Image (spheres, grey):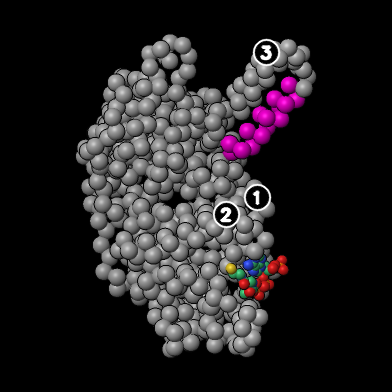
Amino acid sequence: MPVLTPQVDKNSEEFARNRSRLLERIALLDEQLAAARAGGGDKYVERHRSRDKMPVRERLDLLLDRGSPFLELSALAGWGSEFTVGASVVTGIGVVSGVECMIVGNDPTVRGGASNPFTWKKIIRALEIARHNRLPVINLVESGGADLPTQVEAFVPGGALFRDLTRLSAAGVPTVAIVFGNSTAGGAYVPGMCDYSIMVKGRAKVFLGGPPLVRMATGEVSTDEELGGAEMHSRISGLSDYLAVDERDAIRLGRQVMANINWRKLGPGPAQPARPPRWDPEDLLGVVSSDLRVPFRPQDVLAHVLDDSRFDEYKPTYGTSLVTGWGYLHGFPVGMLANANGVIFPEEAEKAAEFILLANQVDVPLLFMQNTTGFIVGKVYEQAGMIKDGAKMINAVANSRVPHITLLMGASYGAGNYAMSGRAYEPRFVFSWPNSKTAVMGPQQLAGVLSIVAQEAAASSGREFDEAADAIRRASVEQQIERESDSFFMSGRLYDDGVIDPRDTRTVLGIALSAAHSNQIEGTRGFGVFRM
Ligand code: COA
């Protein structure tokens, strides 16, 4: 396989400018990640510790195999909303007793670990990832249940949490609940629906209604322990399978359960040893254009990401604004589709469809690297059947069954987002670089379209068009779209699985690919009817 050599001048002004702009965004990302890690802040963390309890990330550290990586997901959930960034829960993929698992841990320092609408979405997304990739799930439970003031946003769809836990079990994927504290009302169905439940003595409180509610409803007077304590559930109700003497013991028991589930991944292991790229990933920062209107070569990105920087480009001289080809990542074979200059023309759409079929024929996962302004528009292309060619690509993407992983490297506009396996096309994972933007179109274009529509409406009804008011409206729409297409904003709404530092791309994709190989890797041989 040929070796890629980056075609960038590391001493150029452009390289320096790209690097410094991306570093600025990464610094902002680090600030937000630190805010998520801080949870409810010093006051609540201290109070939690004074109760002799560990913060969720310490529980996580003890649970994971020593020195193994943890790929945190949706860390910016709730960003830009009234809720604490991270949405009072930590989710991610880690290794416990040698088993790659999905871990869902409530952060009880943020509003008692209560679940707001972003928390529900984040947990349900984590369970979806677990289902698609066949990852056992460990819940670290301590939550005040639904965030009561915003219950209307989440109560009805939130039921999916319990549904998905039992569906995982039905699909042969073990689920575990380790209960460290409150797990009231609906929350009681987390241990209730899991295959294994472990409860901490004197701490776990698992009941449908606490003492005040029971007293109001029935007049019965009872204590927390009688209604839902760990000892009661371990000795009387039988809901608890293991009684832990303290938090550390509970984590030890969780590791013991995982050690005994006789877990085997269904996908093939890596096809060859992992070899690092020949080029320093640090230089990715200078490769990635700081201006979305200025394209950059995906081959220059791949040179810093793929094993030994080797890439077998497919159809390199045809449909050149989309780069396709084969390579290895941490030893796993992978097919790449990456936008080169933003626009998808008919040739690119056909080439993509063909390439996706090839990957399905040989069961190779696909990596979609988005930097696209969408399908080409204009008379010539409409008449040549751009919609039909775009439909071929969307057909292939939608019906492909090999795992897809999508990386937003820059622009993700219009139907380009869909055709390049955007969130709605159910890729196994979607990650974004902090410079990326996602919207139906760019802010200037969107504001311009609205302005033309308004001018035409005024003309057809014989009204005078107010240029000054239009200029103000245009500026405000541009600002709104600029803000809403920002990667932090999109990630805050769970439209991706995390904003990542571009230098971590190889590691993140490697963990994601390894997770995907927990399930079978099998392409489809049948597609929808292709428009010709
Ligand atoms: N919805 C919204 N806010 C909640 C909440 C919930 N379900 N549970 C707790 N909070 C808030 C509290 O109002 C408090 O806010 P403040 O610090 O601004 O005053 C903060 O979270 C911490 O709660 P606090 O009660 O001080 O923490 P605690 O650690 O002593 O107790 C709980 C935590 C969860 C045991 C306790 O808050 C509780 O019982 N909450 C209600 C549980 C419940 O019945 N939920 C309904 C289930 S569907």
- Neighbours of disc 1 within 10 Å: few (<14), some (14-19), many (20+): few
Total marks placed = 3
Q: Quadrant of the N terminus?
A: top left
Numbered mark located on residue 511 in the image: none
Residue 182, position as x, y percentages in the image: 56, 75
Front residue (pair 423, 184)? 184
Q: Quadrant of residue 416?
A: top left
Q: Are marks 1 and 2 in contact (CB under 8 Å)?
A: yes
Q: Residue flagged by tag 1: what amino acid is it?
A: Ser
Q: Residue furthest front?
A: 218
Q: Which residues are magenta?
A: 470-486
From mark 1 to mark 2, how far is it between C-alphas? 9 Å
Disc 1 designates what residue?
A: 81
Q: Check disc 3 and report its element: helix, strand or loop.
A: helix
Q: Quadrant of ligand 1?
A: bottom right
Residue 360 among those drawn in magenta: no
| Residue 368 appears left or right of 457 | left
Q: Quadrant of the C terminus?
A: top left
Which one is earlier in the sequence, the residue at label 1 or at label 2?
A: 1
Residue 185, position as x, y percentages in the image: 55, 72
Q: Residue flagged by tag 2: what amino acid is it?
A: Phe
Residue 482 among those drawn in magenta: yes
Numbered mark located on residue 118 in the image: 2
From mark 3 to mark 2, how far is it between C-alphas? 44 Å
**Which residue lies at the image location 43% right of the left edge and 80% below the top edge?**
240
Q: Are marks 3 and 2 in contact (CB under 8 Å)?
A: no
